[in-house]
């Protein structure tokens, strides 16, 4: 990794982490999810970074993939276990980070600690020599030592320029990942999830988070309006996920065209990912640069 790229990663990391911590300061019962998501995104933009993905706010047994809609009425409540997941990029170089906060109660303090400690431990042993299954094993054994389960079908991931999930997966269990190792300078997000439920997630309803797929199908769009909307989506969001909220700002009264693009297979919506047995879920995530003798946390 050259020095200019390294500096961009460091900057993205600082801005994402600062926005995450600012978001945490806003989490209170009675506050709207929409308010927190908008404020955190504004903060990233004010710091001259780009939004790598919509701010994700996942409550309780929802593990990941929810972003408020433009008119989302939902409010935080006392006792909510909130996963706040934030991403910023500098010139396409992405930092991805998440934290779990329980609002006003301490019923799930151990579950929160389990995913936090799993992340700390795996970061402490991660090098270019560490087989990915060993990373998964470290996460799994830490979480099970608390009497909980890791979520086996959610994984950390490689990060590449303008690419949020770049092929390599960082498992949360020892049975996955095999003997493969990473290279010096690889950038990855590591994200242990812990639960008192089944230990896996299933897909649920829409997340309000979309992705414009790089597909030839866009070339065959016939009507001009759909074509125009598609171009504007590509110009604004490129290959990165975008929120219903952001689309709504561009096209306030045009949900129909979005539906058309989804039917055409040009745009897809991510599903919400819910714990299979309705277990409570916690998550902690950092982005790191992997080195021969360790790894550097940038968030
Ligand atoms: Mn994340
Ligand atoms: Mn991630």
Image: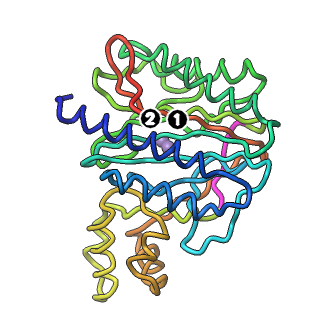
Residue drawn at x 34%, y 83% as measured from the top left? 226
Q: Residues within 10 Å of mark 2 (few under 14, many from 20)?
A: many
Within 8 Å: ligand 1 and the Cβ of disc 1?
Answer: yes
Q: In the rendering, at what x and y percent does residue 191 appear? A: 53, 34
Q: In this view, does 55 lie above or below 188?
A: below
Give the mark nearer the N terminus: 2 vs 1. Answer: 2
Q: In this view, does 78 lie to the left or right of 271?
A: right
Q: How crowded is mark 1: few (under 14 residues within 10 Å), some or many (20 or more)?
A: many
Instruction: Give the alpha-carbon distance from disc 2 to disc 1, as whole Å.
Output: 7 Å
User: CB atoms at circles 2 and 1 under 8 Å apart?
Assistant: yes
Q: Is residue 294 above or below residue 19?
A: above
Asked where in the image residue 153 lies, by quadrant, the reply is top right
Residue drawn at x 31%, y 28% as measured from the top left? 186
Q: In the rendering, at what x and y percent does residue 92 appear? A: 27, 48
Membership of 202 in magenta stretch:
yes
Q: Is residue 156 above or below residue 231?
A: above
- Nearer-the-camera pick, 258 or 221: 258
Residue drawn at x 80%, y 41% as measured from the top left? 105
In magenta, the rendered stretch is 199-204
Within 8 Å: ligand 2 and the Cβ of disc 2?
Answer: yes
Q: Residue 143 carries which label?
A: none
Name the residue beneath numbered marker 2.
189
Q: In the rendering, at what x and y percent does residue 26 appear? A: 60, 52
Asked where in the image residue 32 lies, by quadrant, the reply is bottom right
Name the residue beneath numbered marker 1.
285
State the quadrant of the C terminus.
top left
- Nearer-the-camera pick, 170 or 113: 113
């Amino acid at each position: 990794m050259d020095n200019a790229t390294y500096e961009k990663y460091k900057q993205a990391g600082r801005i994402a982490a600062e926005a995450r911590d600012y978001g945490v300061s806003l989490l209170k019962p009675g506050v709207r999810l929409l308010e927190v998501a908008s404020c955190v995104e504004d903060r990233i933009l004010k710091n001259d970074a780009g939004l790598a993905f919509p701010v994700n706010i996942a409550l309780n047994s929802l593990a990941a993939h929810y972003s408020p809609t433009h008119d989302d009425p939902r409010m935080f409540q006392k006792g909510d276990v909130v996963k706040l997941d934030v991403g910023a990029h500098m010139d396409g170089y992405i930092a991805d980070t998440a934290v779990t906060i329980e609002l006003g109660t301490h019923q799930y303090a151990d579950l929160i600690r389990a995913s936090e400690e799993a992340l700390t431990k795996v970061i402490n042993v991660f090098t270019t020599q560490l087989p990915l299954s060993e990373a998964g094993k470290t996460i799994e054994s830490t979480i099970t030592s608390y009497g909980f389960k890791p979520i086996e079908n959610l994984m950390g991931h490689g990060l590449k320029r303008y690419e949020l999930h770049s092929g390599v997966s960082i498992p949360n269990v020892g049975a996955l990942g095999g003997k493969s190792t990473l290279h010096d300078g690889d950038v990855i997000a590591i994200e242990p999830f812990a639960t008192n439920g089944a230990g896996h997630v299933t897909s649920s309803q829409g997340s309000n988070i979309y992705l414009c797929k790089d597909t030839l199908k866009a070339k065959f769009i016939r009507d001009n309006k759909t074509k125009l909307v598609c171009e504007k989506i590509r110009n604004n969001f490129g290959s990165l996920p975008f929120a219903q909220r952001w689309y709504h700002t561009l096209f306030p009264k045009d949900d129909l065209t979005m539906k058309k693009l989804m039917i055409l297979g040009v745009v897809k919506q991510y599903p919400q990912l819910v714990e299979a047995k309705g277990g409570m879920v916690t998550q902690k995530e950092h982005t790191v640069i992997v080195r021969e003798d360790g790894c550097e946390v940038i968030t």
